[in-house]
Image (tube, helix red, strand yellow):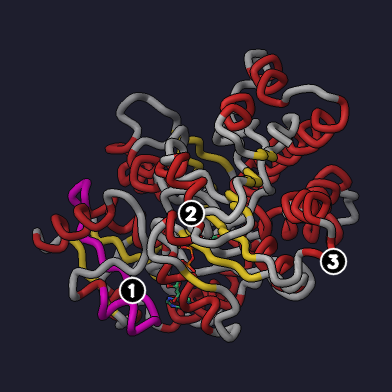
Amino acid sequence: MNVGVIGSGYVGLVAGTCFAESGNDVVCADVNEEKIAMLNRGEIPIYEPGLEQMIATNAEAGRLQFSTDIIQCIQGSEVIFIAVGTPEDTDGSADLKYVLQVAEQIGKNMNGPKIVVNKSTVPVGTADLVRAEIEKHTSLPFDVVSNPEFLKEGSAIDDFMKPDRVVIGTSSVEAAEVMRELYSPFVRTDNPILVMDNKSAEVTKYAANSLLATKITFMNEIANLCEQVGADVAQVRKGVGTDARIGPSFLFPGVGYGGSCFPKDVRAMIRTGQENDVEMSVIKAVDFANNEQKKRLTKKVISHFGESNIKGKTFAVWGLAFKPKTDDMREAPSLTIIQDLIKLGAKVQAFDPEAMEVAKKMFQSQGSPIELSETSYDALNGADALIIVTEWNEFRRPNFTKMTQCLKSPIIFDGRNLFDPSKMSRLGFTYYSIGRQVAGA
Ligand code: NAD
């Protein structure tokens, strides 16, 4: 099948590459010339495990091409995926400007029947808007399919190649059949392809992300309670997660969710509720509680040192990406923590295994207020304490002796519960974590 993917970011690039991997001829198009030039040189603009190799193999086989020529991408494809960004608008809603720009371009450049697939996360009713926009410019036949994406950064290839389910929103039997054919190589273990109407597919994506954000936030709140009452959230998590009705995933407490999806999708869901006179009280509370949770670690730092003593202190930060195995820092908790510390007059030395380039660009635009260290141990040199924000594997088993030698004082604020409190106490650390008692204080 000839497949066009417009928007070659995390989602478009992964989807396009995986469709090429299953034998389709794919053109990934993007307006970002620098991104396409990099891809054509064999450089990958994002960090995603396994992606580089898969792109190289498929590009070499001639099945995967990268282009800034959107018109050619439209005209050469039977199925066109829209995978552009849908960032948060000022009122919390998803900004559909890029999606509708692409719809307009498709309408203006149609050269035969097409299936237009909304892969971007878009609010309910967007398929109708896309259809109306295309219809303004063409009388050729086309279908609009809503096909939300559920991949996770860090395991995007695996998630795409082995999805729990594929959601296809369409009222066209023919379009559903083409989509089934496209996705059938990825559901060979009989995971379902769920065909439903466009609106239900659009709501499914927001409902799934909001529910996951709720699970995380709920457990963060339980963790905060555990701290106050002398309970251990690690035990509570096991006690709760072994209930088959609840399940073990998304119950690890931390410093709040971040990233390019949960925060904006939760807020877009709230906005959709407002527009439709539905009080989304649970999700509103989730958004509020998550913003508070991002401040939680800094509050522990303040209560340990005293607010007036933070000025002039140096803090090592391990982990900048919003989660491990990605270099994405969009709405990362690290940003809130670093900004709060800097506001209090502290100095920050940070390290992340993959997000250093992204961080450099991000902090350069703010006048480089932090120091980016070469290694995790460099970040500790002369620091008054370590703050752990992202649970990268390499932070799980560090050399504690070396850590005590590098740090000015052996104090750790761990936002991801990487270590055992009693062991940390034995090693001579003062160790704060989330939902557990302070060790060694
Ligand atoms: P991204 O910002 O990484 O990539 C979007 C790309 O679209 C950019 O490269 C941009 O240059 C390009 N673009 C913008 N306007 C364009 C236009 N008119 N023509 C061609 N290209 C254009 O975004 P992303 O993370 O890939 O997300 C894309 C969509 O998928 C969003 O709606 C997001 O919510 C959703 N989504 C993201 C994830 C994720 O983990 N990142 C997961 C599921 C769904």
Q: Which residue is mark 3?
A: 308
Q: Which mark is residue 248?
A: none
In 3D space, how far apart are the residues under numbered discs 2 and 1 (Cα atoms)?
47 Å
As for residue 422 lying within the magenta part, the answer is no
The mark that comes first in sequence, 3 or 1, is 1
Dot 2: element: helix
Q: Position of residue 217 (x, y in %)?
A: 74, 41
Q: Position of residue 23 (x, y in %)?
A: 18, 50
Horizontal side, residue 437 vs residue 194: left or right = right
In 3D space, how far apart are the residues under numbered discs 3 and 1 (Cα atoms)?
52 Å
Q: Which mark is residue 406?
A: 2
- Does the CB distance between marks 2 and 1 fall below 8 Å? no
Q: How many marks?
A: 3
425, above or below 280, in the image = above
217, above or below 385, in the image = above
* Residue at disc 2, CB closer than 8 Å to ligand 1: no
Range shown magenta: 21-38
| Mark 1 surroundings within 10 Å by alpha-carbon count, few (fewer than 14), some (14 through 19), many (20 or more) | many
Amino acid at the residue labelled 1 = Ala
Location of the N terminus (image quadrant)? bottom left
Q: Which mark is residue 29?
A: 1
Q: Is residue 217 visible?
A: yes
The mark that comes first in sequence, 2 or 1, is 1
Dot 1: element: strand
- Does the CB distance between marks 3 and 1 fall below 8 Å? no
151, above or below 350, in the image = above
Camera-near label (3 vs 1) is: 3
